[in-house]
Amino acid sequence: MLNTLAKLMLTGTALAPIALVYAWVLYAEGKCIYAFYLVTASIILLGLMLWILKYCKANLERSKFKVTSIEAADREHITFILLYLSPLFVAEFGDLNWNVLIPTLIVFLLVISTGYGYHFNPLLGLLGWHFYKVSTEEGVSYVLITKKELRSAKQCLKVGQLTEYIVIELAENENGK
C-alpha cells in the first residue's frame, strides 16, 4: 500500500491541467521560461503517476475483491473544467494573489493526503482509466481504479490496495502475473 504517496500523486496529477492553463497565460504574456517550467512539471507529474500505477499493477499484493455495488466516481468533470479555466479569468498572471494561492494549495494537498477524501483525476480518465465507487459484502466502500468499464456489480476482481480506501484492479496478464 502506497497510501500518502498515492494520494499526493492522484491529487497532483488532477491539478496538473491547472498548471497547463497557467502556462498558457504565461506564454501569452511572453514569460516563456516560466511556462516551460509549468509544462515540464505537469508532464513529470503525469509520468510519475503512470509509472506508479504500472508499478502497482506489477508489484502490489493481489487479493480477491467481491463487488456488490458499483457507481461511477468520475462525475465531477464540470467542477474541474471550471477550476481548470479559472486562471483565464485573471487579467494577468501577476494579478494573482500568491499570498493566498500558495497556502491554499498547500492546505488542499495536506487535507487530501491525510484524509479519506477522494479526488477525481480527469487526466487519467483521458488516458483510459475509470474510477468507480464500489461496495463490498462487508459494506465497506472503496474507490476502484481500473482500465475496464464495469457493467455488473456481481463480480470478483483481483485488486491491490493503493490507500486505505482506494484500490486498483490488477487484471491477470498473459504471464499469469
Image (tube, rainbow, N blue to C red):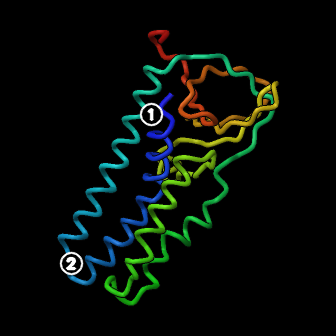
Q: Residue at x 80, y 34 (%)?
A: 69
Pointers 2 and 1 in contact (C-beta within 8 Å): no
Quadrant hosting residue 24: bottom left
Q: Residue at x 33, y 82 (%)?
A: 93
Q: Position of residue 66 (x, y in %)?
A: 74, 22
Q: Position of residue 6 (x, y in %)?
A: 47, 39
- Towards the viewer: 5 or 20: 5
Name the residue furthest left: 33
Q: Count residues near mark 2 (Cα–Cα under 10 Å), then give few for <14, some for 14-19, many for 20+.
A: some
Q: Amino acid at mark 2?
A: Lys
Q: Residue at x 53, y 51 (%)?
A: 121
Q: Which residue is mark 1?
A: 53
Q: Count residues near mark 1 (Cα–Cα under 10 Å), then give few for <14, some for 14-19, many for 20+.
A: some
Q: Is residue 76 left or right of residue 44?
A: right
Q: Is residue 137 above or below residue 147?
A: above
Q: Is residue 53 left or right of residue 131?
A: left
Q: Circle 1 sits in a helix, a strand or a loop, which is it?
A: helix
